[in-house]
Image: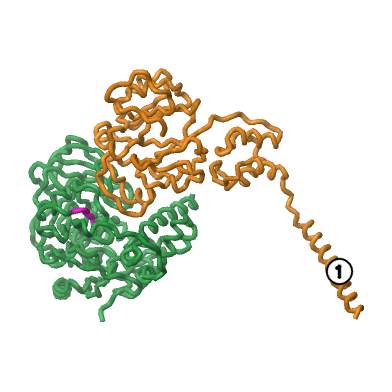
Amino acid sequence: MNSIIITAVLVLSLLGVALAIVLYLVAQKFKVIEDPRIDLVEAVLPGANCGGCGYPGCRGFAEAFVKTDDIGSLFCPVGGNDTMAKAAEVLGQTVEAKDPMIAVVRCSGSPELRKRVVEYDGASSCKLATALYSGDTGCQYGCLGLGDCVAVCKFDAIHIDPVTLLPVVDEEKCTACGACVKACPKFIIELRKKGPKGKRIFVSCINKDKGGPARKACQVACIGCGKCVKVCPHDAITLENNLAYIDYNKCKLCRKCVEECPTGAILEINFPPRKQKVEGQAMNVESN
Amino acid sequence: MLKTFAKGGVHPPENKFSANRPIEVLSLPAKVTIPVSQHIGAPATIVVSKGDKVKVGQLIAQGAGFVSANIHSSVSGTVESIEPVLDSSGYKRPAITIAVEGDEWEPTIDRSPELKRHIDADAQTIIKKIAEAGIVGLGGATFPSHVKLSVPAGKKADVLIINGVECEPYLTSDHRLMLEKGHELMVGIQLLMRALNVDKALVGIENNKPDAIKYLSEIAKEYPGITAHALKVKYPQGGEKQLIKALINREVPSGGLPIDIGAVVHNVGTAYAVYEAVQKNKPLFERVVTVTGKNLPKPSNFLVRIGTPVSELIAAAGGLPDDTAKVVNGGPMMGKAVTDITVPVTKGTSGIIVFPAAESKRKAESVCIRCAKCVSACPMGLEPYLLIRMSQRMMFDKMEHERVLDCMECGSCSFECPANLPLLDYIRLGKTEVNKIIRARKN
């Protein structure tokens, strides 16, 4: 009786040792040497796996970050400067701080200002609607309001306003990952510099039609009159295809263009209220 | 037992209200707007400028490259502007607007009504004339016809198939054309046969047009090689691949073209345009358009100059009924709702259908119950219930594997779906994305 137990224990022990040796040799043979810094970098990243950096998830970014010669060319929009500084520290380097960015919706065509001329009752997706027709208003460039940007946002930072039917970006939550920019089939959303204390000025329209048709389709359209270009003391505004564009790197936030714009297409965000209000002019909203 | 295609298909209510209305010539509008992209392929290059005087049939835009088509003025008058105008989907596209003055035709066009049966042009001349006349597939696909007739090296056509199916409900323009221009059509078919160097042509007509089948079968006896065939009524029999399967029982391989199995398909409208172009020297600047709808006072078939605003056609058919909620350009299955009724008739406009409010709205969407009605309906043997899921989850690489590009967007799946899912919408999105993937792979 005893000898059976002893034999069994012995056989299994020997088998275990033999297999352990085989496993050890195999593990040695197929060993993958991975830079330990990748794990360290990954640990400081936000772990959102949003793809906003252009790499597949945070692990992908960490691998690229460790491998690259120029770490300044990479940026984690979600983590921002703090995260980038920490990640650079892992490698014993430093990176220059970048200006924080934010997603900006360049359309102000609420139903009140931009009349609906067609009714769409297809599937609720901007991409599908764009494939079929230009939109339910006279403006072929404007927001469809079906929320493709809302669907892709992983940070719950963009929502459709029930009154204006336009997307509104939550400044606190937006990480400027750029998912909404890619999702918008009308190319309405742009990443712009957040600005000091969130102050920023931009042309909230991408209508490239001539003044007449643009104005007819939407009361707050950019009509390409060029007044803002003339008034801008910093050369920050360019006019192309009947559409003004403000370069956020040149803009000094003087707000002269906002006053000059005859249609109210240029928005100012997070500025203190002006002292004297111009009667009858469409005043700008507090936040977009 | 009548012939038809094997897989799938549906039978929507026919509603062919205008079948007994002879083709009427629509009076000239005050102004026409002629878009420069009315065909598949590169937009034509404009060769007139603002203020120019043009005659009916004068070339106003030259086809840009091989897969493109010439565009001719449909009226005589002055070029008023060359500016983007709204197309039927609401986008602005380049177009030529001409103010009509009189009706002066190019002197080279033979306007006599008599039939010219004798063919003296050879194959090359016929194809050249078709290209010059700017003829495109008039069934609605608007693919340049001369491209289809230029058989690539190493391939050979042995049969010509003429599409007189008109499987779309409501539409009757091809039906009326077959009844009223039968002999011209036959000569047009002979021209196409000569261009392709084939000695056999089959005209497929659905059995809901017995008068056309009888008439064409009778006159076909005078034209050697041409026969007319009755087919069972089933949508989408007018699809090239379905019609080939129904008539000669050959199957176009996935991703292939009809020429791969020796067949070339042309619409009856195209064959008639070929007759006019080759025998009468008349470019394509007018076409037959069905204007119809349940509540429209006078459903009609009109011979319309290209560029005429759709609103004028509706006015001539008795005016827009009060309860109208949707106007569709094309057939009810594959046509598209227009965003504005001032948009012009183009080469591809086979019909204008006015829908009352009760029939305009999509029904509320519910959930897929896996009944597989869409699978039975699909004439291409695809699985729409699977494709919509993949498209919604952005699994476009898998969609390519599931042969989504075989889909011809006939809409049978969406028509049959008891849950009213937007199947075709999502499949169309998938096709666009898969095409992007394929293009990226090539570069």
Q: Is residue B169 left or right of residue B376?
A: left
Residue B113, horizontal then vertical, whole percent:
8, 59
Q: Which chain is home to disc 1?
A: A
Residue assigned mark 1:
A13
Q: Is residue B315 left or right of residue A288?
A: left
Asked whether B184 or A176 is in front, the reply is: A176
User: Hue of chain A?
Assistant: orange
Quadrant in which residue B276 is drawn: bottom left
**Is disc 1 placed on a helix, strand or loop?**
helix
Q: Is residue A259 above or below residue A57?
A: above
Residue occupying image coordinates x 50% and y 36%: A172
Residue A206, horizontal then vertical, whole percent:
36, 35
Q: Which residues are magenta?
A: B324-329
B326 is within the stretch colored magenta: yes
Residue occupying image coordinates x 54% and y 45%: A50
Asked whether B170 or B4 is in front, the reply is: B170
Quadrant where the N terminus of chain B lies?
A: bottom left
Mark 1 crowd level (few <14, some 14–19, many ≥20, 10 Å Cα): few
Identify the main secondary structure in magenta: strand
Asked whether B124 or A25 is in front, the reply is: A25
Residue A69, horizontal then vertical, whole percent:
66, 36
Name the amino acid type tagged 1. Ser
User: Hue of chain B?
Assistant: green
